[in-house]
Amino acid sequence: MRHSASGPTHTQRLPLQAVWALQRAPAAGPGEAPPAARDEEWIEIPGPSTVAAALRALGRWSLDAPAQRFDADDWWFRARFDAPPRATGVRRRLVFGGLAGHCEAWLNGAPLLASDNMHLAHRCAEPRLEPTGNELLLRFASLDAWLARKRPRPRWRAPMVEHQQLRFTRNTLLGRTPGWSPPAAPVGPWRAIEWVDERAVE
C-alpha cells in the first residue's frame, strides 16, 4: 500500500505476458516508422532482455564467438499480447523499468514514449488496449549513428572509452571500454516491463 494525493492506494504488479520477437535493421533517423516486416524476418525470443542476452539464450551469440557490435544497427523488439483482465475501479499503467539505449515505443501504432536514459523508469498513462491482438514495438536506435553527430570537443580525454562522445549519453560504459569490460554493449530492455494496477483504499 502507498499514499498518493488522493489517499492510500493498493498496488499490484503483473508482468507483461506476451510473445516477443527481435529484428535487426539498418540505422535510421529519429521518428522512423515501425518496420512493415514479414513475420519470418523476426526472431522469436524468450522475453524482454538486452539483445546480447536474447541472442545468447537462442545460441546465436556468446562471448567466445567473434565480437559483434550491438551499437552499429537499430534493434526492434515486438511484443504481441492480449489485454489482461482488470477489475472495476483499478487504474492501470504500463511501466518500463529500464531501457538501455535511445528508445522509441509504439503501442498499437500510436507513439507511446521516447527515452534516452537507461537509468530512468517510465510509467505510461493507462493505455488504450484491444481485448486481443495488441502490439508493442520498441526501437533502440544505433548508438554509433547518434555518436557520429557533431558535438563540442571535450576538454579532456577518457583513455578507457572507445568513443569520447559517450559522455553525452546516459548509457553505461560497460561493453564500451575495450580491455576493461567484455565487448557486449547492453541494448534493449534491461529491467522488467510490467503492468501496475492501483486501487483506492478506503
Image (cartoon, rainbow, N blue to C red):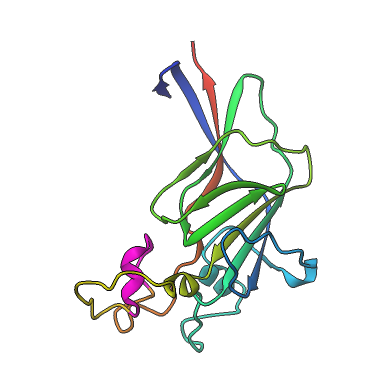
Left or right: 165 with respect to 89?
A: left
Instruction: Give the quarter of the image for residue 6.
Output: top left
State the quadrant of the N terminus: top left
Magenta part of the chain: 162-174
Residue sitting at x 23%, y 76%: 158
Residue sitting at x 47%, y 62%: 101
Q: Of all residues shown, which one is farthest toward the left? A: 156
Give how far across and how far down residue 93 sits, in percent.
56, 35
Give how far across and how far down residue 177 sits, in percent.
32, 78
Left or right: 28 with respect to 171?
A: right
Instruction: Give the quarter of the image for residue 184.
Output: bottom left
Frontmost residue, 24 versus 168:
168
39 is within the stretch colored magenta? no
Q: Please, is residue 80 above or below residue 143 in the view? A: above
Give how far across and how far down residue 180 sits, in percent.
29, 79
Frontmost residue, 181 versus 126:
126
The answer to whether any part of residue 173 appears in the image is no
Main SS of residues in magenta: loop
Residue sitting at x 49%, y 73%: 145
Frontmost residue, 53 versus 71:
71
The answer to whether any part of residue 34 appears in the image is yes
Give how far across and how far down residue 127 sits, in percent.
64, 36
Residue sitting at x 69%, y 60%: 34
Left or right: 180 with respect to 96?
A: left
Frontmost residue, 55 versus 95:
95
Marks counted in the figure total: 0
Q: Of all residues shown, which one is farthest toward the bottom? A: 66
Q: Please, is residue 135 above or below residue 65 in the view? A: above
